[in-house]
Amino acid sequence: MNELDRLLQESLTEQLYQMTVSGCRQGKDEDCIFKRKVRPVLLGGRLLFQVTSYKGQQVFHENLTAAGAQKLLEEDLAERFKQLQIETRAFAATVLSSKKGKLTVSKRAHSGADSRPESPVLLHNRQKRYILEEGRPVPFLVDLGVQTTDGKIVAGRYDKFRQINRFLEFIEDIWHILPKDRPVHIVDFGCGKSYLTFAMYYYLHELKGLSLRVTGLDLKKDVIARCSRLAEKYGYEGLHFLQGDIADYSGTERADMVVTLHACDTATDYALYKAMKWQASVILSVPCCQHEVNRQIACKPMEGALRYGLIRERLSALFTDALRADLLEENGYDTQVLEFIDMEHTPKNILLRAVRRREAGSGQRSGSGQRSGTGQDAGSRELAGMLQVHTTLQRLLEEDGH
């Protein structure tokens, strides 16, 4: 019996919380399954494992025995996926699969503080499985007023709890590409009260065991002072907060990951520009208050729609994010435009997740195969030209020779 067989047999029990296989070798092909999740369920008193497979915009479910789930996971790692993450009541584990089929297994036992009071299958159908769980107090969530001291979600704060967990799901899909042999350098632009900054640090450091060097930047002095006190209280030695403007920040020349959540208007452009300049491996951006394009947009075919203020505002915001996504793609990033939280909570719910392509060097070729003088291919140029706009991100990239 090899190491993977032993790990799967030990994991596929009623003590399992969740397994996730990700890092599809075939990329984002709409016809291929790009992720699976596995968790235990009791059906008719029988322990089975619910396999949830994600294909394009579709989700498929099937219930397998432990042996069936083990066979599927072994095939996935051999043929389809690069990584398996396992979370059980007793331990967490990660399996990495190389192109040549070599498996690397790491396993970490939970400490007493990590122990879970109930068997996972007993929780099935009682509550949604979150990365940060209800009923399990997390110090920063308590201090930030999201949880009570016994882990219950504070009335009126459930949307914030869901938002935090949704954000961590985006990180869960990409954390495996972050470096493991040195501290991961993360810059969080416009961190505000830092709900998501603390959540990110807790998830990557406490749950995933990564060494981190995180800088949170915000304009508000009182907010930075409070966040600094909390980081010191929790013993988060790798988490630091600074007061300052995104456009003026020059505290580093490289970063592994850049986060910019609700940075207003062109502040998002400066954050994205700096992330691209640093060749960050991952960029997570939730733009906010896009006014720049709204002031410029002039498109004759859309005049009938643009004369209505609300429609003009929303179209301008969408076109701004489309241009940003195009520019990221054209400068070496695989970019997704994703829904952050439900539209019923806020219309500003778009998240741009960009992952730097391995083959991307200091410059990037356009889709036609010819590098343009500005680093922009026909996509962003034609869209900006049609709308008669010129954004801050375009200007910054042009000035930098991209």
Image (tube, rainbow, N blue to C red):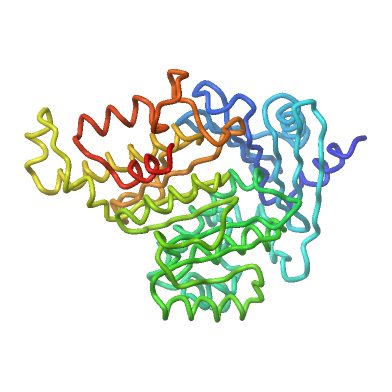
Which quadrant of the structure image shows residue 120? Answer: bottom right
Residue 46 lies in quadrant: top right
x 67%, y 51%: residue: 17
Query: Is 254 situated above or below 154?
Result: above
Asked whether, in this view, residue 339 is left or right of residue 10, the answer is left
Q: Residue at x 15, y 44 (%)?
A: 312
Which percent across, then down, holds residue 45? 68, 45
Is 133 on the left or on the right of 207, as rendered? left
Residue drawn at x 52%, y 21% is: 31
Q: How many marks?
A: 0
- State which quarter of the image contains the N terminus: top right
| Residue closest to the eye, 169 or 337 | 337
Q: Position of residue 337 (x, y in %)?
A: 41, 39
* Residue closer to the observer: 113 or 357: 357
- In the image, 203 versus 282, the foreground residue is 282
| In front of the other: 343 or 273 | 273
Q: Position of residue 277 (x, y in %)?
A: 50, 46
Q: Quadrant of residue 381?
A: top left
Q: Residue furthest top?
A: 368
Q: Quadrant of the C terminus?
A: top left
Specify whether residue 44 is in view. no
Residue 180 in view (yes/no): yes
Q: Position of residue 13 (x, y in %)?
A: 76, 47
Residue at 61% from the left image edge and 36% from the top image edge: 36
